[in-house]
């Protein structure tokens, strides 16, 4: 796919994490944390109780992965920072999640499209990282690989229901797919951190996941009678801490209590 | 048609009463008096709605939970409540009403839910206090419902009670951590939350026995096994001891041990407030129903799409 990248994205990692191993673990921890935060917002507001429970469960899986990875990042860093220190006291530039996961929930179709894109990425990602030389990362990936298959099943089934359902649901789902498409290429862009970690046997080159992702997503969209977007514009930079405006609001809410009353036990 | 065998005529009402008297369960296909069916639908639906509306005041704090550990617990807890709602709606459906009908009745204000959820959650300490007091009061009430005479209700309650006792302990643990946490601000938050939730928690047991319209018949049918006032007393006796461990003051100057009764005496409940909230004039009644009905309406196109898709699939296969 020819990709048009926006100009103005700074090159290289944001300052603060000179250790690529810490950086790598944080990126994947942050993806899971921010998506968990987004999904949990559906709790008590979903279209029906079964969906409420499903989205909450999926959010909990992501939160579990995030906690293990942030804890590991703190250990590797050796500075004594806990999962909560890393979750609650970093700013927008220091978060390294994909821009996709910080996008607002929107309507249910938007949430499902976001999950479809991310789940289709996480299935091969976790499978490949299951043999990482970082044992904690490998453990999270092994557990995550099983969970991600269920997540993908859920987001795929809903994509098909919405795409194939009514005229309204079809239109909403197509709009959601079109709007979020520009955040998908970022998942497969390898930078120096990725290359160094792949070399060290800790990580993988994310560009190797693109084929399987595209296959799975195309299959789901075809079955849903939806059109695969051809928009070549792609936004990236989350891995370098160059986010969309949305992340600051997510963090503002998530971090508010700890920042108001720092240093206490809760 | 000729019958080769005749059975002795048994009056179904006698059989029904005999099953209840023998402490056995009435099952969905058994004959039951219309009033028993209506009472159960009212009570189980009200209970299910309470679980579901009760998700809102706690979901209010998921995004702002102070630690990831607390966030995970709170998410799991609110999900448990959705699950309790599901078991209970399913139990009510065995009596001949659909979940959609119950939802519509709730949104139209024709079905009630526990008034306790019409209060706002203003600080993180409210998450602890809801677990400690509100779930504590709910368990006191629900333990007896495990022995309710209607089988599907009683079995749903067995499962719910197990999860509720975990909810109550996690609430107590939040408060204990804040009280021991060493910060004045945290202790103030806890005391303030306890001040706000104490009286509404006592109201959860319903009006005094002398005022309760449903109690007598429900006790005869063994749907309800212990009276409102007895349950309230049991809850107070248990909770006063726990408040000492926490180091909080319960906001009732009349609360004191009565040696003769073997129970704590307590002050007069503000029944005007109770009835005002029941009638829809509590601090959050409007928001709770607006949010619930709003989410239901916003999700209509999703439910329609799922139905349309499955209808198309059936036609193809």
Image: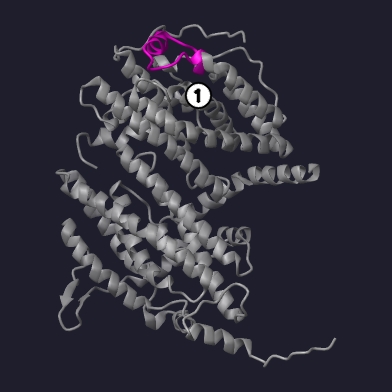
Front residue of A16/B121: it is A16
Q: Is residue B152 above or below residue A192?
A: below
The residue at the point 54 percent across, 50 percent down is: A49
The residue at the point 39 percent across, 63 percent down is: B161
Q: Quadrant of residue A199?
A: top left
The colouring scheme, among rainbow, by chain, secondary structure or one colour, is one colour
The residue at the point 34 percent across, 55 percent down is: B167
On the image, the x and y values in percent for residue A59 come to 45, 38
Report helix, strand or loop for mark 1. Answer: helix
Crowdedness near tag 1: few (<14), some (14–19) or many (≥20) residues, C-alpha within 10 Å: many
Q: Which residues are magenta?
A: A187-207
Front residue of B69/B276: it is B69
On the image, the x and y values in percent for residue B294 come to 56, 48
Q: Relative to residue A34, is residue A184 drawn left or right?
A: right
On the image, the x and y values in percent for residue A71 come to 29, 29
Q: Determine which residue is flagged by label 1.
A: A100
Front residue of B243/B159: it is B159
Q: Is residue A26 above or below residue A13?
A: below
Residue A3 shown in magenta: no
Front residue of B88/A248: it is B88
Q: Is residue B237 above or below residue A33?
A: below
């Amino acid at each position: 796919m020819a990709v048009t990248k926006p100009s103005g994205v700074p090159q290289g990692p944001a300052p603060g994490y000179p250790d690529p191993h810490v950086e790598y673990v944080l990126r994947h921890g942050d993806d899971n944390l921010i998506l968990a935060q987004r999904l949990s917002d559906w709790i008590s507001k979903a279209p029906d109780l079964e969906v409420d429970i499903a989205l909450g469960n999926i959010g909990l899986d992501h939160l579990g992965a995030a906690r293990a990875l942030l804890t590991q990042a703190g250990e590797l860093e050796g500075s004594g920072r806990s999962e909560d220190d890393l979750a609650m006291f970093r700013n927008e530039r220091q978060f390294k999640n994909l821009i996709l996961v910080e996008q607002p929930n929107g309507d249910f179709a938007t949430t499902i499209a976001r999950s479809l894109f991310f789940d289709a990425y996480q299935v091969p990602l976790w499978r490949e990282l299951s043999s990482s030389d970082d044992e904690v990362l490998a453990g999270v990936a092994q557990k995550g690989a099983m969970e991600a298959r269920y997540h993908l099943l859920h987001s795929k089934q809903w994509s098909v229901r919405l795409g194939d359902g009514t005229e309204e649901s079809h239109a909403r789902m197509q709009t959601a797919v079109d709007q979020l498409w520009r955040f998908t290429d970022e998942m497969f862009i390898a930078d120096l951190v990725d290359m160094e970690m792949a070399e060290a046997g800790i990580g993988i080159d994310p560009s190797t996941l693109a084929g399987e992702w595209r296959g799975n997503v195309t299959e789901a969209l075809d079955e849903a009678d939806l059109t695969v977007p051809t928009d070549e514009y792609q936004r990236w930079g989350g891995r370098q801490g160059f986010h969309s405006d949305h992340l600051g609001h997510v963090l503002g809410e998530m971090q508010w209590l700890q920042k108001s009353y720092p240093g206490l036990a809760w | 048609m000729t019958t080769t065998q005749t059975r002795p005529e048994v009056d179904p009402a006698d059989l029904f009463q005999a099953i209840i008297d023998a402490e056995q369960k009435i099952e969905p296909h058994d004959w039951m008096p219309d009033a028993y069916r209506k009472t159960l639908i009212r009570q189980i639906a009200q209970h299910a709605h309470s679980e579901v509306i009760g998700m809102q005041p706690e979901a209010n704090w998921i995004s702002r939970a102070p630690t990831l550990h607390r966030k995970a617990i709170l998410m799991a807890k609110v999900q448990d409540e959705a699950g309790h709602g599901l078991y209970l709606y399913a139990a009510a459906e065995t009596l001949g009403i659909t979940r959609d009908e119950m939802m519509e009745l709730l949104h139209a204000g024709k079905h009630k839910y526990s008034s306790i959820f019409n209060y706002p959650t203003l600080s993180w300490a409210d998450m602890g206090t809801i677990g400690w007091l509100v779930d504590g009061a709910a368990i006191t009430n629900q333990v007896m419902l495990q022995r309710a005479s209607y089988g599907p209700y009683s079995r749903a309650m067995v499962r719910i009670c197990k999860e509720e006792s975990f909810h109550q302990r996690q609430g107590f643990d939040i408060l204990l951590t804040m009280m021991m946490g060493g910060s004045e601000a945290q202790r103030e938050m806890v005391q303030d939350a306890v001040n706000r939730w104490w009286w509404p928690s006592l109201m959860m047991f319903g009006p005094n026995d002398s005022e309760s319209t449903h109690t007598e018949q429900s006790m005869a049918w063994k749907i309800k096994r212990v009276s409102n006032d007895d349950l309230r007393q049991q809850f107070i006796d248990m909770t006063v001891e726990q408040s000492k461990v926490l180091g909080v003051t319960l906001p009732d100057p009349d609360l004191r041990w009565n040696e003769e009764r073997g129970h704590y005496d307590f002050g007069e409940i503000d029944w005007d407030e109770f009835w005002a909230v029941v009638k829809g004039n509590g601090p959050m009644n409007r928001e709770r129903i607006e949010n619930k009905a709003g989410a239901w309406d916003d999700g209509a196109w999703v439910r329609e799409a799922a139905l349309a898709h499955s209808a198309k699939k059936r036609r193809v296969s």
